[in-house]
Image (spheres, helix red, strand yellow):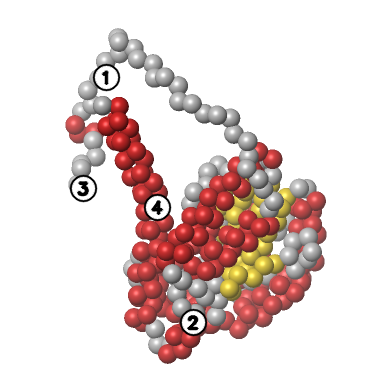
């Protein structure tokens, strides 16, 4: 009887593990669906010049291994009260969001959180430019991933005319000092630029146009950014030149291949933060308290969600 009970527990534990893997598989199936749409609507014969797609088994093996290391890093951040800030920048459809999803997928959202700020409101436009970002910076034992950041001023705001030339110049004068101040305060600051080619962005935009589940990702601003590709390129080059400092350097992620980009980014992030296995107190489940006088009351059937599956 005891062996049968243990076998049942082992089977359920294995099923829970598969469920966990299914979360990642669901994302990858979605990627595959998107890839088929991309191929269907592609008009670029040179697409075959890309490196061959990464073997799925190797991709999953490496991803799960790296996510395990991210859990260790998370525990170390909490143990040592570290403060980590990671900026993700790049063109629209460069794969920043999918990389962030893979990083945060197994982590505690109370420790590792994502900051994706909307356009500033009227009040925020009158504040010191960095003010609305400061409130999202981490306390000890926290990691914050910025899905776009204060570098909006060097990119979209500059190209689209949402800031003046004087405001842009003030940003370039101020941001190195701002970031040096963050580093001096004990924050580890990492800055990633996800780089994709002109053709790749064109294909990903077409993919989104023909997929009803992804069309919400294409805003009028995204479409306008496509038209202004060269202006964004010039803005990026100026940004990298003027804000690449020893205290907070830029790291470029080749992102035409999403799978490789995710693995490369995660592996590099882990290499930039020294960590070890954090000590853990041994955890034991306490015995459940049984009260013979307690009787569970009935729940009306209409309160249950219909079991459609």
Which is nearer the N-term, disc 4 or disc 3? Answer: 4
- Compute the Cα span from label 2 to label 1: 62 Å
Name the residue: 70% across, 67% down.
250
Q: Is residue 261 left or right of residue 241?
A: left
Task: Say which residue appears at 65% left-offset and 38% top-offset.
Answer: 79
Quarter holding residue 34: bottom left
Classify 80 as above or below 283. Answer: below
Q: Position of residue 147 (x, y in %)?
A: 57, 59
Give the class, few, some or many, for how many residues have Cα within 10 Å of label 2's Cα (few <14, many ≥20). few
Q: Quadrant of the N terminus?
A: top left
Q: Which residue is mark 1?
A: 296
Check disc 3 and report the residue beneath it.
309
Dot 1, how many residues are within 10 Å of its Cα: few (below 14), some (14-19), or many (20+)?
few
Q: Secondary structure at mark 1?
A: loop
Closer mark to the observer between disc 3 and disc 2: 2
Q: Of marks 3 and 1, which one's residue comes earlier in the chain?
A: 1
Q: CA distance from mark 4 to mark 3?
A: 21 Å
**Residue 221 visible in image:** no
């Amino acid at each position: 009887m005891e062996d049968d009970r243990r076998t049942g527990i082992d089977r359920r534990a294995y099923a829970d593990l598969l469920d966990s893997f299914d979360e990642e598989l669901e994302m990858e199936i979605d990627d595959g669906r998107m890839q088929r749409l991309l191929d269907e609507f592609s008009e670029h014969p040179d697409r075959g010049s890309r490196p061959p797609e990464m073997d799925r088994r190797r991709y999953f093996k490496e991803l799960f291994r790296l996510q395990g290391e991210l859990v260790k890093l998370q525990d170390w951040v909490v143990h040592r009260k570290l403060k980590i800030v990671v900026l993700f920048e790049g063109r629209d459809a460069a794969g920043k969001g999918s990389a962030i999803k893979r990083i945060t997928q197994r982590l505690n959202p109370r420790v590792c959180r994502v900051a994706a700020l909307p356009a500033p409101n009227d009040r925020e436009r009158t504040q010191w430019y960095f003010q609305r970002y400061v409130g999202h910076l981490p306390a000890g034992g926290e990691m914050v991933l910025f899905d776009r950041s204060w570098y909006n001023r060097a990119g979209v705001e500059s190209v689209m005319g949402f800031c003046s030339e004087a405001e842009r110049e003030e940003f370039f004068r101020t941001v190195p000092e701002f970031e040096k101040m963050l580093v001096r305060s004990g924050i580890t600051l990492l800055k990633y630029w996800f780089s994709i080619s002109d053709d790749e962005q064109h294909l990903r935009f077409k993919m989104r146009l023909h997929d009803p589940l992804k069309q919400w990702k294409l805003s009028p601003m995204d479409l306008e950014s496509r038209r202004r590709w060269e202006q964004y390129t010039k803005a990026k080059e100026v940004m990298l030149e003027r804000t690449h400092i020893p205290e907070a350097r830029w790291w470029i992620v080749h992102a035409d291949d999403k799978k490789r980009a995710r693995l490369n980014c995660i592996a590099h992030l882990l290499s930039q933060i020294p960590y070890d296995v954090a000590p853990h107190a041994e955890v034991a489940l306490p015995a459940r308290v049984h009260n013979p006088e307690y009787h569970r009351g009935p729940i009306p059937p209409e309160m249950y969600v219909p079991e459609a599956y």
